[in-house]
Image: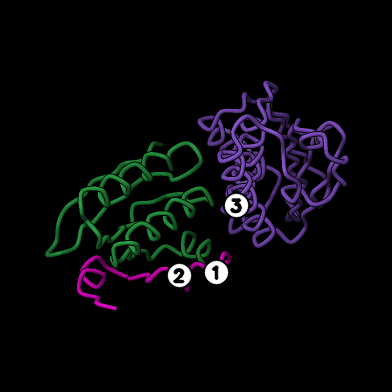
Amino acid sequence: MPTVELLFSALPEHVRTARLVAAAVARRAGVDEAVLDEVRLAVGEACSRAVGLHRSSGVDKPVRVLLTEDEKKFSIEVGDEVPITPVNGSAPAVPSARGDEPRPGPAPAEDSEADDEGQMGLAVISGLVDDVEVIEGENGGLIRMTWPTMAP
Amino acid sequence: MDLSLSTRTVGDRTVVEVGGEIDVYTAPKLREQLVELVNDGNYHLVVDMEGVDFLDSTGLGVLVGGLKRVRAHEGSLRLVCNQERILKIFRITGLTKVFPIHTSVEEAVAATD
């Protein structure tokens, strides 16, 4: 069971709230003070990306953030609810790293912009966090990031 | 915290002083400001980031967009930043090679290439 679970409407103004909550829980969990800036940035990137995906796909569901404190680690999972779907009736997309697949949406130009930003966000996350997994599910994607914690 | 923006002219440069957090919510305001400056004929910009507490990839995207716009007019976009937490984001994305980054507004304004 996560230590803290956060659900927020897919709106850019709530991403800051997610950053603040994640940093506060990470600090309590014993994540090194020097790494908290990275936690803040990484969770912000993951949430911005999820918000972008929800908005460009017209998904009305909230973005989910799970903050879990374990004995020696602290992990953050950011889940979106945008499934990979075939575009224009073409063959079903093969699950792969999120962002590689074209996504259906009302405006192609906006879509590609959202995708570009999502890619840049992923680039920043993978540069920042050593332990990161990007998981594709039928009902949406998940980014899981883990940091070590210090003994209390 | 919200984003604060103020602009002033120093010689032939336009200095944009940015404060607060540049993220997915506030970045559009910075984008609008940069677009407006370029549309008004200001092609040599100095973006002072000393008051920025937080910058994410959306903010980076806006700065790259600004650079693209001024370059279309043979202009320049220079950054002023001494904060390690902000500089780190430019480094991991390789953008330190794209943006001239200065330690003071005076240095950025005086720089020619």
Q: Disc 1 residue type? A: Gly
Compared to residue B5, the image places residue A56 above or below, namely above
Amino acid, disc 3: Leu
Name the spot of residue A50 as percent of width and height, x first: 66, 37
Q: Nearer the viewer, residue A123 or A145?
A: A123
**Residue named by callout 1:** B94
3 vs 2, front mark? 2
Q: According to the rendering, which colour does chain A have?
A: purple
- The amino acid pointed to by label 2 is Val
At horizontal 69% and vertical 59% (from top left) the residue drawn is: A126
Mark 3 lies on residue: A36
Work out how far the residue at label 3 is from the one at label 1, CA to CA, in angstroms: 22 Å
Give the labeled residue for mark 2.
B98
Chain holding disc 1: B
Mark 1 nearby-residue class (10 Å; few <14, some 14–19, many ≥20) = few
Marks 2 & 1, CB-CB < 8 Å contact: yes
| Mark 1 secondary-structure assignment | loop
Image quadrant containing the N terminus of chain A: top right
Q: Secondary structure at mark 3?
A: helix
Which quadrant of the view contains residue B82? bottom left
Image quadrant in which you'd find residue A150: bottom right
Alpha-carbon span between mark 3 and mark 2: 27 Å
Q: Which range is magenta? A: B92-113
Against A98, residue A35 (above or below) is below
* B108 in the magenta segment: yes
Can the viewer see residue B56? yes
Left or right of residue B35: residue A151: right
Q: Residue furthest left?
A: B11
